[in-house]
Image: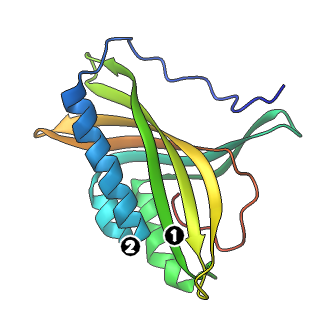
């Protein structure tokens, strides 16, 4: 039996999320993918809450446990983005393809909307060859500030566990 992720689901009241907030949130996620593809990291970060928590995790069947690859808050991501020019980078262009986005729940008391989205990321190298880089799932929490959905946490749940060097950027 293949276990996908040992991460417990976010405990949120099972109040259904209407299509209007879900569509607004999906547009923010789609725009975020475009900004990350264009390497506009600071612009992407500006769309997130100041108390953002971001992590990339995978389940390892070898150790039968979750592995955390990256865990940063808003300030930590700022530092990472400032240092990116000094890092050895995987050359080429990334393209994030967002699949479905569905409601995982809504906590009316905290005004938190939980959503999950499927994701495929492709990489095109400098010679024009494209390959599947990874598959994953976004598990995001949003809240609305002045009517605009703002991401306050993202957990990237990786299916792919082997990535090439230079993978210091958010997925």
Where's residue 8, x and y in %? 61, 23
Tag 1 secondary structure: strand
Identify whether 53 is placed above or below 77: above
Quick check: 63 left or right of 110? right
The residue sitting at the left extreme is 146
In the rendered structure, which disc, 1 or 2, sits on the residue that comes first in sequence?
Answer: 2
Residue, far top: 14
Find residue 131 and report its horizontal and vertical position in percent. Answer: 65, 68
Look at 55% across and 47% down and name the residue there.
55
Q: Position of residue 139 (x, y in %)?
A: 48, 37
Among all residues in the image, which is located at the extreme bottom?
127
| Rendered-image quadrant of the N terminus | top right
Q: Of all residues shown, which one is farthest toward the right?
A: 62
Viewer can see residue 156: no
* Residue at 23% over, 21% down: 18
The structure residue drawn at horizontal position 41% and vertical position 73%, both measured from the top left corner, is 39
Height in image: 115 above or below 134?
Answer: above
Q: From what the image shows, is residue 129 above or below residue 37?
A: below
Is disc 2 surrounded by few (<14), some (14 to 19) or many (20+) residues within 10 Å? Answer: few
Query: Which residue, given by chain and number where applicable, does mark 2 sit on?
Result: 38
Task: Examine the image and state in which quarter residue 122 appears.
Answer: bottom right
Q: Nearer the viewer, residue 37 or 151?
A: 37
Image vertical order of residue 38 relative to residue 85, above or below = above
């Amino acid at each position: 039996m293949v276990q996908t992720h040992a991460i417990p689901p976010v405990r949120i009241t099972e109040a259904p999320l209407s299509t209007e907030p879900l569509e607004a949130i999906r547009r923010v996620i789609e725009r975020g993918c475009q900004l990350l593809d264009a390497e506009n990291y600071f612009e992407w970060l500006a769309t997130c809450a100041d108390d953002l928590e971001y992590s990339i995790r995978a389940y390892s069947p070898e150790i039968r446990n979750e592995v955390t690859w990256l865990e940063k808050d808003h300030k930590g991501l700022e530092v990472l983005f400032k240092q990116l020019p000094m890092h050895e980078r995987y050359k080429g262009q990334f393209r994030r393809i967002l699949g479905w986005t569905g409601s995982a729940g809504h906590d009316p008391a905290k005004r938190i909307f939980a959503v999950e989205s499927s994701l495929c990321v492709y990489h095109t190298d400098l010679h024009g060859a494209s390959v599947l880089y990874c598959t994953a799932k976004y598990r995001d929490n949003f809240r609305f500030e002045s009517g605009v959905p703002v991401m306050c946490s993202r957990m990237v749940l990786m299916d792919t566990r082997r990535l090439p060097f230079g993978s210091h950027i958010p997925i």
